[in-house]
Image (tube, grey):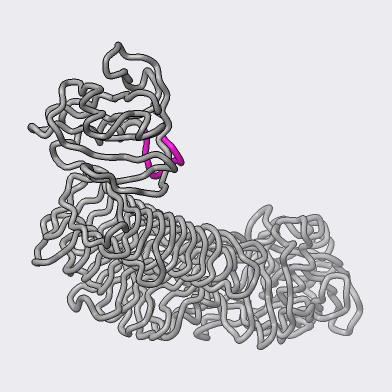
Amino acid sequence: MKIKALLISVLLTVLIAPLACAGTVVNYPMFQSIDGDGNPRSGALLYSYIVGDAIPKALYTDKACATPATNPVVLDSNGEAEIYGLGCYKLVLKTSVGVTVWTMADFCGTQDQYVTYYYPDSSAADHGATGDGNTIKYAVDDIGTTNKATIFLRHIAATANTDYVFGTTDNYTSNTNITFIFENGARLSPSTGKTVTLPSPENVIVDPEQQIFTGAGLIAFAKPGTAYPEWWGIDGTADEVQINAAMVGNTGGVIKLLPRTYTIADDIAVTQKSELVGSGLNTIVTGSVTGDMIGVNVGGGTAWSGGAIRNMQIQGTASGRGINLYKTSRGFVVEDAMIYSDDIDYGLLVTTSYDVQLRNVRCVKPSRGQDAGSFGIKLDNANAPTIIGCAADGYDNGLVVTDATGATINPNILGGYYQFCNTGIDIQGGDAGIIAGVYTEENDDENIFISGTGSQANGWEIKRCYIPDAAATGTIGIRVGVARYTTVWGDGRYGATTPIQLDAGALDTLVYANATVTNNAGAGETQIIRWDTGSWRLFKTLEILNDLTKVPSIRLSAGAISFADEDVSPVSYDAVWGRQGANTVGAGATTYVSPGAGIRLKQSDFNSSNPPTNAELISEFGAAATVGVGFTAIVDDADGHANEYLIFSDGTKYWYITAAAAP
């Protein structure tokens, strides 16, 4: 604001006083004072003060308001002075001998009509104090919490940066009505141990790449929003310092990384409920960090929900961890991220966490693959995690689960794009997980391994996975080790040298797959239902009814499928197929599953009639009364599998289901 020329002192009062703090200044080229006879007041003295006080407040001799004028300003022989002001003033004009001509109690000027601007003086010693009316605190207090206004922080061109120092902690949480504009080069600088709290990032008008914060103290936002670490002064050396400062200052908000390379020397620590979001794969976080490149650690504090790491690439040069989620609770998301490094041995580690969501995360060792003990993704004591659309290439193990309950792995690609893994998926422990729709590309040892090397893995389901023909001799498609209640089913492809292998310790395994099974399990350890090519149509009939592994029983009802007595017309009959129970292998037929106490399932190949007669069934299995209620069998015609039937006993007679036609 330039205090412009005035013809007479009375005119000054009339034109300026009504403008208050939200109008426009009168349009004269210079300040001028003329007495009642029309003569200039040569040597007159213009004093400037804080409004409502006797504390001096500086006027300036230049438009940039960089050079304070003397106070009082001495008018020249024409009664003129070129002076500029910032904000509001009390003005007092006196003659050259000190006689008061007039007093203006509240004069405010602005560069923009209808908007109030305040221009704090960067040279003020402490902008957290009122000072002489030229501080940020003074402007905030003067504006209050209702009137809309703008605080404009200027940069003095003669210096590299213009710092507004806070020697006192100040909190502007309630001042959401104030906008802060930073001229390029202007910065807030809280001293050690001091905190400046701004309303929110949305109250700041500044370029994302411009530094506006410095100093040893803390800048915080009362309401989280989207903040950029460049505001804290990214310099390309130890960028985690500025990123972490943004995390602390904007906890619960979004820390937005630009499409550039950020070089770190220590870990980036994601704070409570915050999101670290890049700009795609052109956002690269790199550095030599032996611990975590990016870490999330709730620690022993109260569990919290939410938070995310998204849209970036991590390239480390040391054998540390790309991302480590430790004690992360409920719904943390890692999404659209690539960990791309020959040196990082542990791509993404999830430990002691709940409901973590991993989506479209690729962990890659592009050229030096299969370093011993390395892994792409590892879940350790992680309950209910979901892994969707992820991939791991070139590690010793692509995906490792040491302890996870209720994991969902669907669908993912393990190995084969850059390098092969030794083991695609290794389930070393944990219960009730699902591996579905996974594509494992010719890994060197096992593609999917329920190993149970940490603890017995219980209740894992593997369905509709795709394993192409193996590149290396001796590979195994699906291998089941120390595990119980494992189910393998669905019309996937199992093209490894050994499609499916059951080891000693594989208890109560159900296989519903069109693949060769190598059964190395000990006697009495494993019960299998296995449909080979000729009897696949029976599996397809059952498949459309329900997923055997997801419900405690399957109820087959009239109308859904036809039931018939062996010698009479079809009748209505309900049968319940129970779950696992004790097993006894019967002579003359192989028992594959015992789905409940007193319920046995047998498969038998013999030349039966079409349909089988009661006499044939008695000859094969014994009388219906002998086998008891709930006895279940599969009758498979030995001559080309032309006729297949599912047989039930109600304790009196046999019933059968006619299987669907062969696909």
Residue at 65% across / 82% down in the picture?
Answer: 190
Q: Is the magenta stretch mostly helix, strand or loop?
A: loop
Q: Does the magenta stretch include residue 261?
A: no
Indicate the position of residue 415 as horizontal and vertical percent values. 21, 64
Left or right, 112 with respect to 161, comes to right
Indicate the position of residue 201 as horizontal and vertical percent values. 59, 63
Question: Which image quadrant: the N terminus?
Answer: bottom right
**Depth check, front residue: 73 or 249:** 249
Indicate the position of residue 490 as horizontal and vertical percent values. 26, 43
Question: Which image quadrant: the C terminus?
Answer: top left
Left or right, 334 with respect to 79, comes to left
Residue at 27% across / 15% down in the picture?
Answer: 567
Left or right, 112 with respect to 444, comes to right
Image: 339 above or below 589? below
Q: Quadrant of residue 553?
A: top left
Residue at 83% across / 61% down in the picture?
Answer: 13
Q: In which quarter of the image is residue 390?
A: bottom left
Residue at 30% across / 51% down in the picture?
Answer: 527
Image: 471 above or below 495? below
**Depth check, front residue: 184 or 90:** 184
Task: Identify the magenta region.
Answer: 546-554
